[in-house]
């Protein structure tokens, strides 16, 4: 078994280091802008709760539905121009938020931003796969998740201070500048892609449409016919569905089941992020002993246990432990799952697979947001948590059976 590269060794790779810096900068800008949008919609435009929820839905919908198509183009286009132009276009779109005076204009800008992001995200995944050796992919993906979680902690606090002191426009300006900074970081290095198969030149309009549909179906067929890949895609979808259910309901759970205060809600929410950060840092050590498939199975099982504890024992201490365990277990799904996808997917399909997975997890998160509200009204918040625990356990059991039927299991690198 090849030794896993450390975080320091992975960041020693110039392209990976610049991609990581760009991720931190642009994510921080995004969190500032999203907080500002919600603040403006709530306090200046006097939006209803469903309209405020629409802000998040407007951003997630294109990512959920455009992925299979955008991945086809990512696999065709050169990586560096795709990444840099995506950043610059998004910088221009964010500026439009300054000029938006109505909620539908805000929705339109967010939909456009998301549509462009549907090209950037798979292109970034392809770039990491192309420049990081197989035994460094786990650390690379853990670093990307740590950046996201770290910004999630810092972003809301910084945004609250900036919006209160200087107004929403400063957040939009910083977000636009963050995209420009990301473009400069990526533009400063040589981004390569392994040689692609030659394509026929000058096809007719009908044949171009047919080629697009054929290439989309290639990615879907690869996922459906590769047991390990299919399993981790479903596992990531289940994990994001669970997070989508958990997010809107945990405040209600703290209020009604725990009879807790806003302070308790803050601690419980922080424990989820703390678990994610802790988990991403230990994944490399765990990977030295377990395959990526086994880690994902364990992560699903851990999410099930956390939800069972959450719904079954309505006490503050148990809830804090459960949310920390949920975050830790979720890192055991997302980090090795992304690594396995990058390791198993041929270079020529990497954009399509990455974008299709992006669509699945975004759709799962959206579904979780929608289902949680309806289910909690029909049943109870605790019942939703317990049913989600059953879903995680069922998928872990089904995944084990699916992997056992795979005739070419792949050990962790």
Image (spheres, grey):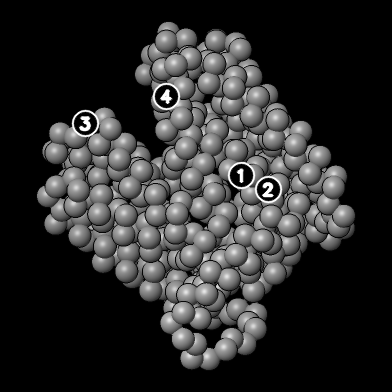
Image quarter where the N terminus lies is bottom right
Residue 37 image-quadrant placement = top left
Q: Secondary structure at mark 1?
A: helix
Task: Name the spot of residue 330 as percent of width and height, x first.
Answer: 62, 38
- Cα–Cα span, label 2 and label 4: 27 Å
First along the sequence among labels 2 and 4: 2
Q: Residue at x 26, y 66 (%)?
A: 92
What residue would you read off at disc 3?
48
Which label sits in the foreground, 1 or 4? 4
What residue would you read off at disc 4?
374
Which sits in the foreground, 15 or 337? 337
**Contact (Cβ within 8 Å) of mark 2 with mark 1:** yes
Q: Secondary structure at mark 4?
A: helix
Q: Residue at x 81, y 40 (%)?
A: 401
Residue 283 image-quadrant placement = top right
Vertical position of residue 139 compared to residue 163: above or below: below
First along the sequence among labels 3 and 4: 3
**Contact (Cβ within 8 Å) of mark 2 with mark 3:** no
First along the sequence among labels 1 and 4: 1
Image quarter where the C terminus lies is bottom right
Give the crowd class for mark 4: few <14, some 14-19, many >=20 residues within 10 Å.
Answer: few
- Cα–Cα span, label 1 and label 4: 23 Å
What residue would you read off at disc 2?
232
């Amino acid at each position: 078994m090849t030794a896993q590269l450390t975080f320091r060794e992975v960041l020693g790779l110039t392209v990976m280091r610049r991609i990581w810096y760009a991720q931190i900068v642009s994510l921080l800008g995004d969190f500032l802008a999203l907080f500002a949008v919600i603040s403006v919609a709530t306090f200046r435009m006097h939006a209803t709760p469903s309209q405020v929820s629409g802000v998040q839905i407007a951003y997630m919908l294109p990512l959920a539905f455009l992925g299979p198509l955008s991945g086809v183009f990512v696999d065709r286009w050169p990586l560096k121009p795709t990444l840099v132009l995506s950043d610059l276009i998004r910088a221009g779109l964010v500026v439009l938020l300054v000029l938006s005076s109505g909620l539908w204009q805000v929705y339109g800008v967010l939909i456009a931003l998301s549509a462009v992001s549907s090209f950037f995200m798979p292109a970034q995944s392809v770039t990491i796969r192309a420049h990081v050796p197989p035994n460094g992919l786990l650390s690379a993906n853990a670093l990307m998740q740590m950046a996201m979680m770290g910004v999630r902690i810092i972003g809301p606090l910084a945004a609250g201070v900036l919006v209160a002191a200087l107004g929403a426009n400063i957040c939009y300006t910083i977000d636009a500048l963050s995209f420009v900074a990301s473009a400069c970081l990526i533009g400063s290095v040589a981004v390569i892609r392994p040689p692609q198969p030659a394509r026929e030149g000058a096809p007719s309009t009908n044949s171009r449409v047919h080629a697009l549909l054929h290439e989309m179906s290639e990615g879907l067929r690869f996922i459906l016919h590769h047991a390990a890949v299919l399993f981790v895609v479903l596992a990531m979808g289940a994990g994001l569905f669970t997070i989508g259910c958990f997010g809107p309901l945990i405040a209600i759970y703290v209020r009604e089941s725990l009879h807790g205060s806003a302070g308790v809600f803050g601690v419980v929410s922080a424990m989820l992020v703390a678990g994610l950060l802790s988990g991403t840092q230990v994944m490399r050590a765990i990977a030295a002993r377990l395959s990526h498939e086994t880690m994902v199975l364990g992560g699903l099982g851990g999410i099930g246990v956390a939800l069972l504890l959450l719904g079954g024992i309505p006490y503050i201490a148990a809830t804090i432990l459960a949310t920390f365990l949920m975050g830790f277990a979720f890192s055991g799904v997302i980090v090795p799952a992304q690594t396995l996808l990058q390791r198993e997917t041929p270079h020529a399909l990497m954009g399509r697979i990455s974008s299709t997975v992006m669509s699945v997890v975004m759709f799962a998160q959206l579904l979780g947001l929608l289902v949680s509200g309806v289910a909690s009204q029909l049943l109870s918040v605790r019942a939703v948590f317990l049913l989600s625990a059953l879903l995680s356990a069922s998928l872990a059991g089904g995944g084990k059976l699916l992997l056992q039927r795979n005739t070419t299991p792949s050990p962790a690198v």
